[in-house]
Amino acid sequence: QVDHSPFDSMGSSTGFDLQIGGISPALIAAGAPVSAAPWRLAGGDGSDQIEAALAPAEVAAAGAAFGLHLDLESSKPPALHDGDGFVDFGAGGSSYYYSRTRMTATGTLQLNGEQLSVDGIAWFDHQWGDFVSVGGGWNWFAVNLDDGTDLTFSVVFDAEGNDAFAYGTVVEPDGSARHIEAGAFGIRATDEWASPRGDRVYPTHWFITVPDFRGGRQLLIELTPTVDDQELDARATTGVIYWEGSQHVRATIGQLDATTQDGQAYVELTRYGP
């Protein structure tokens, strides 16, 4: 009911097409009609589409309309994480993992009856394996700098909450990618945010350092949440509550000859609660 992906005459996949139709359980219980098109992710080979819109009953309940259509085109080849696209977490499991770290995004955004033309960049992650139900969670960072450099860092924890595995990937403006070992970067948080919905406290305001980033010059990235409360309650689907959200970026490359720039970033935090 979800997977409408196309296949060629030999039965091989030629892309993906995932469509999910649904509506708020509360509206279904109230007998609200469901007449919205499904939310859709589709594409392949670095050319994708995103489509989403609220059903009329949902619009009435929320008091606001929302719709989105984006066309995405990859401007770089896929980056294979950990060098070859296969990440071995040891006791934490393993996964295949690649990213399209910078895709041009163009389309329309509908807000309260107004149709807006939008453009920007997008990040496409594809990770699959036996790692989700093993271990104690992870902190994950994705950063797009304004000079065209893209970076991702991941710290995986064991069941006791200790660091079990860490790695990073740098994708240069020309699309070339290189692996960063755990000892070649540092991550620390300088603040925290307590969820008003329970006993979860999340670290915030991050500093990421790569001492030998490019030509011996140090990279320092400061990340500040655009909104503190970006907690996601996904107990109805994946069974967990976690924090993921966008960040303000301030990056410095070098020291005496330092240059600064801005960017966009996204952070995902799991394991910070029962």
Image (cartoon, rainbow, N blue to C red):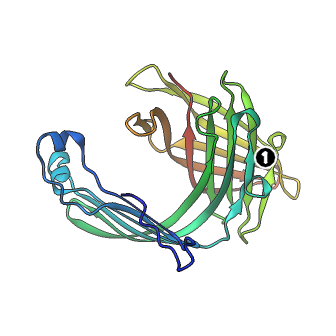
Count of picture labels: 1
Q: Nearer the viewer, residue 82 or 147?
A: 82
Q: Nearer the viewer, residue 72 or 215?
A: 72
- Residue, x 71% and y 68% (percent of image)? 173
Q: Residues within 10 Å of mark 1 (few under 14, many from 20)?
A: some
- Residue 266 screen position, x and y as percent: 55, 48
Q: Amino acid at mark 1?
A: Val
Rendered position, 165 above or below 16: above
Dot 1: element: strand
Residue under pointer 1: 210
- Residue 200 screen position, x and y as percent: 48, 23
Q: In the shown orientation, is residue 90 left or right of residue 247?
A: right
- Residue 106 screen position, x and y as percent: 44, 72
Q: Nearer the viewer, residue 235 or 249?
A: 235
- In the rendered image, the residue lying farthest to the right is 216
Q: Is residue 136 visible?
A: yes
- Residue, x 39% and y 58% (percent of image)? 2
- Residue, x 37% and y 36% (percent of image)? 236
